[in-house]
Image (cartoon, rainbow, N blue to C red):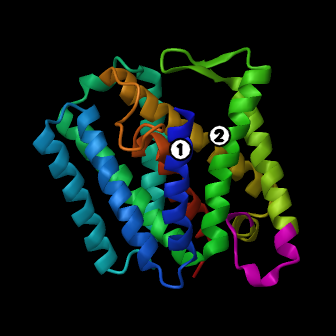
């Protein structure tokens, strides 16, 4: 299993890194378009769609993303889109986590399919828009999610006492969440310190929050983004538990499915775009 995980991770990095570093945005857009289409296929399978319907959901999402690309939204998305999606994540995520796995199947399948496709469409659009803002910006958002998740894992193992959501993900604890939030603040401080001496690096999420909101409130918003990464992780766990599945698929040997790897990114990227566009003309 460990060998599979390493090989899969190396292959993914070999595809992702050149796409991110390319001078043109289209390699990254094409790569992520394929991944988001696969995630939509997985979403259908987790939500009682048959084989043909799941494939149709994946293809439909790819078409919807391509239409947004053609309309120029990957470079210039109306800020209202980010705010609407973020509010939906906050309200819908809180409601879903409150009702638990037993409440999710009570929602009509068509609505569940639609909610998933909207979330995935917005996440892809936010990913490509973040890439258009510059390499420093998109890497800072990726690192926020990765650091929050990694620190929460180790903090939970070392300090975890109070369970966060026993019926959804028994391994997660409040102490892990707080550790992840603290690590994100430390990351932001280190990033801003480094960026201050590298003026050509371009804006990062952290410098944009500082510009738009100021340092104290920006720090609170970073804590909120770390919390949103937890919401994304828990939401996918809730859907999998409701479906009786451990992984969203087996597309990525040793890692499960695409949704298993991007769940925390789904709410964070639109929220990061919303918060960083505040005050822009």
Seen as rendered, the residue at the extreme left is 52
What residue is at 65 percent from the left and 44 percent from the top? Answer: 226
Residue 203's x, y, as percent? Answer: 70, 75
Question: How would you classify the magenta stretch by its main secondary structure?
Answer: helix
Residue 165's x, y, as percent? Answer: 55, 20
Q: Which residue is mark 1?
A: 264
Q: Which mark is residue 149?
A: 2
Task: Count residues near mark 1 (Cα–Cα under 10 Å), then give few for <14, some for 14-19, many for 20+.
Answer: many
Asked which quadrant contains residue 198, the reply is bottom right
Range of the magenta residues?
Answer: 194-206
Q: Evaluate whether residue 77 shows in this view.
A: no
Q: Quadrant of the C terminus?
A: bottom right
Dots 2, 1 in contact, CB < 8 A: yes
Q: Nearer the viewer, residue 20 or 3?
A: 3
Residue 272's x, y, as percent? Answer: 58, 59
What residue is at 17 percent from the left and 36 percent from the top? Answer: 49
Residue 143's x, y, as percent? Answer: 67, 55
Q: Is residue 200 magenta?
A: yes
What residue is at 78 percent from the left and 57 percent from the top? Answer: 188
Q: Is residue 40 magenta?
A: no
Considering only vertical position in the picture, is 82 above or below 236?
A: below
Report how far apart the C-alphas of labels 2 and 1 lie in the structure: 8 Å
Q: Is residue 42 left or right of residue 187?
A: left
Q: Evaluate whether residue 193 shows in this view.
A: yes
Q: Is residue 85 left or right of residue 215?
A: left
Q: Nearer the viewer, residue 216 or 21?
A: 21
Q: Nearer the viewer, residue 220 or 71?
A: 71
Considering only vertical position in the picture, is 128 above or below 12?
A: below
Q: Secondary structure beneath disc 2? A: helix
């Amino acid at each position: 299993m460990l060998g599979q995980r390493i090989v899969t991770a190396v292959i993914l990095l070999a595809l992702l890194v050149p796409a991110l570093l390319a001078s043109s945005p289209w390699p990254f857009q094409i790569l992520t378009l394929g991944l988001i289409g696969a995630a939509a296929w997985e979403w259908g399978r987790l939500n009682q769609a048959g084989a043909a319907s799941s494939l149709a959901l994946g293809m439909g999402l790819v078409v919807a993303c391509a239409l947004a690309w053609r309309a120029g939204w990957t470079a210039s998305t109306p800020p209202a889109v980010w705010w609407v999606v973020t509010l939906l994540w906050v309200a819908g995520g809180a409601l879903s986590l409150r009702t638990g796995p037993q409440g999710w199947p009570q929602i009509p399948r068509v609505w569940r399919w639609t909610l998933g496709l909207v979330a995935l469409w917005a996440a892809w659009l936010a990913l490509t828009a973040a890439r258009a803002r510059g390499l420093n910006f998109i890497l800072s958002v990726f690192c926020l999610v990765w650091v929050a998740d990694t620190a929460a894992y180790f903090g939970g193992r070392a300090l975890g006492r109070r369970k966060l959501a026993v019926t959804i993900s028994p391994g997660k604890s409040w102490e892990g969440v707080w550790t992840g939030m603290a690590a994100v603040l430390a990351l932001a401080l280190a990033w801003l310190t480094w960026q201050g001496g590298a003026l050509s690096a371009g804006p990062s999420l952290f410098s944009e929050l500082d510009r738009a909101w100021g340092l104290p409130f920006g720090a609170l918003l970073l804590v909120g983004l770390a919390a949103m990464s937890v919401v994304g992780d828990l939401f996918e766990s809730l859907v999998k538990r409701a479906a009786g599945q451990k992984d969203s698929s087996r597309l990525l040997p040793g890692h499960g499915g695409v949704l298993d790897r991007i769940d925390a990114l789904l709410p964070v990227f639109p929220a990061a775009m919303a918060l960083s566009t505040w005050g822009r003309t």
